[in-house]
Image (spheres, helix red, strand yellow):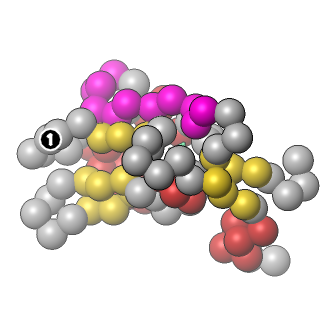
Amino acid sequence: IKVEDKLAINRYRVDEGRPHVRIKRHEDPSPQLLAMTKICPAGCYELTEDGAVEVSPAGCMECGTCRVVTSETGEIEWAYPIGGYGIQFKFG
Ligand code: SF4
C-alpha cells in the first residue's frame, strides 16, 4: 500500500478559522522553512510563485516535524488542535 493510500485512511476534523500551524509573515524563508516543502510527510507546505512558503494544515498528522525543524528560526506557530479536532488515526 502506498503512503498516499495510507494517509487517505485517516480522518481529519478541521477547526476552520483556527489553524493549529501558522507561518509568520516572511519575505525570504529560511532554509529550514523551505525544507518543509520537501519533508512534511503530509505535504502541507508549498512554495508560492513569489518565493514565500504557505502551509495548509488541514491534512496535518501532528507529527511535529515542522515545529522541530524551524524551532530556531521562529517562523512557525504550532499548537495541537483543541479537543475534538485534528487527525484521527484509523488504526490508533
Ligand atoms: Fe507536516 Fe508534521 Fe508539520 Fe503537520 S506537524 S504540518 S504533518 S510536518
Q: Which residue is mark 1?
A: 26
Q: Residues within 10 Å of mark 1 (few under 14, many from 20)?
A: few
In the image, residue 79 lies at what x, y percent?
A: 51, 29
Residue 82 visible in the current orientation? yes
In the image, residue 36 lies at what x, y percent?
A: 40, 50
Residue 40 visible in the current orientation? no
Q: Is residue 80 magenta?
A: yes
Q: Nearer the viewer, residue 19 or 29?
A: 19
| Kind of residue at badge 1 | His
Q: Residue furthest top?
A: 72
User: What segment is highlighted magenta in the picture?
Assistant: 72-82
Is residue 50 depicted above or below 17 in this figure?
Answer: below
Picture residue at 43% right of the left edge, 41% below the top: 18
Quarter the N terminus occupies:
bottom right
Picture residue at 45% right of the left edge, 32% below the top: 78
**In the drawing, does residue 69 fall left or right of residue 10?**
left
In the image, residue 84 lies at what x, y percent?
A: 70, 41
Residue 64 falls in image quadrant: top right
Picture residue at 68% right of the left edge, 33% below the top: 83
In the image, residue 37 lies at what x, y percent?
A: 38, 57
**In the drawing, does residue 33 fall left or right of residue 89?**
left
Is residue 53 depicted above or below 76 in this figure?
Answer: below
Residue 47 falls in image quadrant: bottom left
**In the drawing, does residue 62 fall left or right of residue 53?**
right
Q: Secondary structure at mark 1?
A: loop
Q: Nearer the viewer, residue 58 or 34?
A: 58
Main SS of the magenta part reads: loop
